[in-house]
Image (spheres, rainbow, N blue to C red):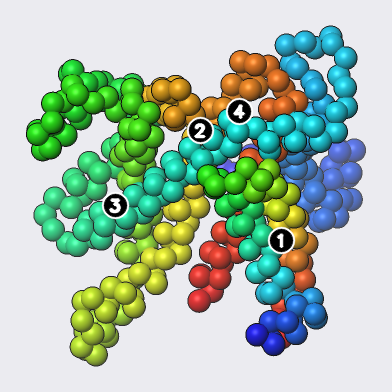
Amino acid sequence: MSRFFRNLLRLRRGPWEMIASALIVLGVFMLMQPFSLWAYGNSFMVTLAGTVMFIIVSHFPEED
Amino acid sequence: MPDKTMDRIAKATPPQVATRIRGLSDRTIAWIFVAPTIFLLLAINIFPLIWTIRLSFTNFRVNRVNADVKWIGLRNYERILTDPDIWHTMQVTAHFLFWTLFLQVLIGFALAYLINKKFRGNDLWTTLIVLPMMLSPAVVGNFWKFLYQPQIGLFNYVVGFFSGTDPSSFSMIGSIDLAPWAIVIVDTWMWTPFVTLICLAGLRSIPDYIYEAAEIDRASKWRQFWTITVPMVLPFLMLAVLFRGIENFKMFDLVVQLTGGGPGSATELTSINLKREAFEKWRTGYASAYAVILFVTIFGLASIYVKALNRVKER
């Protein structure tokens, strides 16, 4: 766990990509879920944030 | 012979042109070769994408070309993301996507596993299994429409025969509850062979000596399946899921032929809904915003998927 946060602070690709992927998956789930209109309404922002973040962080250096 | 042709071409080249070409660096020549592709990519992919994003912020209607086009900011996005009808089409798409992928992977892998065993008539069965994939979606749509007919349809007859119900007592494409399953069945029938073929390629790429080594180590068949077959076929399976997932997210032709999005909006997938907004209601700006939302969703998922695929391949 501490390694995850250390790599996060050092701007390494692995943990940041994981966060971006989690945002995209969450966004897609929010878009297609049948439970809450509020979640549907905010899904695009979450997916877009995750996608843009993924594009940026995939240029970060690899973990040591 | 080719040398002679080359000599003739070289002689036919005007001296000024020949000098100019000789003076070009390798990098420039490489750019000259790549430039047409880049130009086509920009013209066919990038330009329409940027244009769509621009239109998504306007109230443009393509059937009123002379009307003033107003910049309305994020209003189209707001409307889409608060519209319960579009929310419903997203749920219909999710149902279709989940069940088609689940069934296609399950049946596709099982068929590939069976076909991979050496038996007589193996090639014939492979050909028969891939046949549905070769048909046009329009043909398949019409063909299944007949099969689903309550009075004369073979599907209803078979279901009736096994379940003891009256074949004409239910209509697969006329019932709100059954229609979403009707499109899942047809898509699974049509595209399972694609998953089968990809899995078969994966299974045939596993060298026999790995299984032989496992046999020597007295690994059971069950253990061989989970520790050799599944991990080595996994990248191929993931590729199949990626292809089918993206294709099914934008599924249009098959469902339009089969149900037209009905009854009501029970089988109205996002692509059908998008087409209605763009070319029936002519709300081009609104439809552009809708298309951008779908594009970002697919792009995000594809990014994760390609990353995961590379990781599995490295492993």
Mark on residue B274? 4
**Nearer mark to the viewer, of 4 and 3:** 4
Q: Tell me where residue B261 appears, x and y as whole percent.
A: 46, 25
Q: State which tag comes first along the sequence, 2 or 3.
A: 3
Location of residue A3 (image quadrant): bottom right
The residue under label 1 is which amino acid type?
Answer: Phe
Disc 1 with disc 2 on a shared chain: no
Which residue is under mark 2? B269
Location of residue B120 (image quadrant): bottom left
Q: Are marks 3 and 1 in contact (CB under 8 Å)?
A: no
As rendered, which of B165 and B157 lies closer to the eye? B165
Which residue is under mark 3? B107
User: In the rendered image, is residue B283 in sight?
Assistant: yes
Residue at (24% x, 82% y) in the render: B212
Q: State which tag comes first along the sequence, 4 or 3.
A: 3
Residue at (16% x, 25% y) in the render: B167
Q: CA distance from mark 1 to mark 4?
A: 27 Å
